[in-house]
Amino acid sequence: MNLRAAVKKMLPRSLYGRSLLIIVTPLVLLQLVSAWIFYERHWDTITWRLASSIGGDLQYVMTELRLYPEKTDEILQRARNTMQLNIVLQPGEILPNESVSEGGLIDRMLAATFNERIKRPFQIDSSSFKEEVIIDFQLADGVMTVVVPGKRLFSTTTYIFILWMVGTSLILFAVASIFMRNQVRPIRRLADAVDSFGKGRDPGRDFKPEGASEVRLAAVAFNRMIHRIRRQIRQRTDMLSGVSHDLKTPLTRMKLQLALLGSGEEVEAIKANVTEMERMIEGYLTFARGEGGEPSVETNLTVTVQELAEKWKSGGINIDCHVEGVINAWLKPEAFRRSLDNLISNANRYAEHIWVSAGRRGDAVEILVDDDGPGIPEGERENVFRPFFRLEQSRNPKTGGTGLGLAISRDVIRAHGGDILLEESPHGGLRARVRLPA
């Protein structure tokens, strides 16, 4: 995996997460720049000034001690009271001949000011600089040890700056999070409405536009699309209802005329043809009409599958049914029943035994219809879903059907937001795998 792919994988995929990232990233960069400026400029300046103040005080004390050696105790007491410097003189002592180690920022600043002002050998111990800093100076007649309180060298503005920086960042992040959540919520609601409508669940009312102007425009466009689809479905249903009536009327007259002709071999053949024509017309209209007018309701899929299996079993068909627990799903009950019935009918046409099973698989409901028939070649499994396509080319409805059963089944399942796939069955025949959103 290259660097670009790795970074892309780490980035949040949701709009909410990416929006927060867009806001948080500049905020973090701003804080980093502010911290750098503070430590590189402000902190250096403040520390230098504090160190210079200590250097100036010590320079003054040393000058006083040199000019007025008889007032040593008074000078040291005044330094302790007014300058907060605890000074101890050690006559005859000599500092170790070691190089001065400049550790942190305070050590460097003190060393710079001592070299500039006092110009005497010294050693600095700033291991506990927040409490005190111990400095030893080599004088002509001994060593002068100075204990400087930490508050004279350490500025509390560091903590104030950090607290303000972190505090304001948290407040800005909370405000940005609330703002982005309010902006993303309408988009999520719109996505849920689109997904629900795509699965055949008509909301029955217009989606309420909310959020930013762009989201409102998308919501208005979605409402217009729903109205156009509803109008198209209603016009198609009305047209097909008229076609159905116009086609069935002459067939009914033909059946009445045949009934008046009495019985006979030719009459019975014509009656069979009329019945078959009526069945084929009904199949064509069912495919063309779909089930657009039937509303989606929460359905006990377990009961539906079991009842359908019992109906086929009562007709003398060898069928086994197994459903894993109670499964509820949003379905168009009659359309789904017809779709599953077509799959079982297709299996029964070529097989001696049928197995039907259903259960939840992750975020989907899966229904399997297996048989022990001859199956379908892999290259033809997608073609059989095409309207009027039949593997058996004789056009005999008794052997190959009308070529609409599988097309109707897939059309119905896809209207529910699912799909049908054909696979090889472990029983040697064909497996129809139906997947529906849970």
Image (cartoon, rainbow, N blue to C red):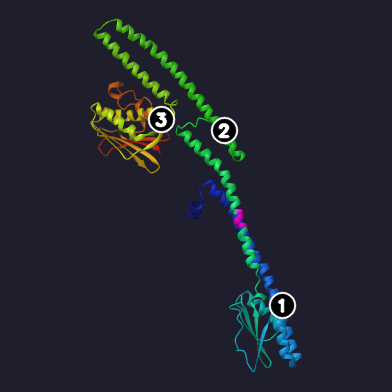
Q: Quarter of the image holding residue 69?
A: bottom right
Residue at the image point whose x is 27% and y is 5% from the top: 262
Q: Is residue 304 left or right of residue 83?
A: left
Magenta residues span: 168-172
Mark 1 is surrounded, within 10 Å at the Cα level, by few (under 14), some (14 to 19) or many (20 or more) other residues, namely some
Identify the disc placed on residue 53. 1
Q: What residue would you read off at disc 3? A: 332
User: In the rendering, at what x and y percent does residue 372 appear?
Assistant: 24, 34
Q: Is residue 17 above or below residue 189?
A: below
Q: Secondary structure at mark 1?
A: helix
Q: Secondary structure at mark 2?
A: helix
Q: Is residue 149 left or right of residue 16?
A: right
User: In the rendering, at what x and y percent does residue 44 appear?
Assistant: 67, 71
Residue at the image point whose x is 63% and y is 91% from the top: 94
> Is label 1 or label 2 in front?
1
User: In the rendering, at what x and y percent does residue 176 appear?
Assistant: 60, 50
Q: Nearer the viewer, residue 431 or 326?
A: 326
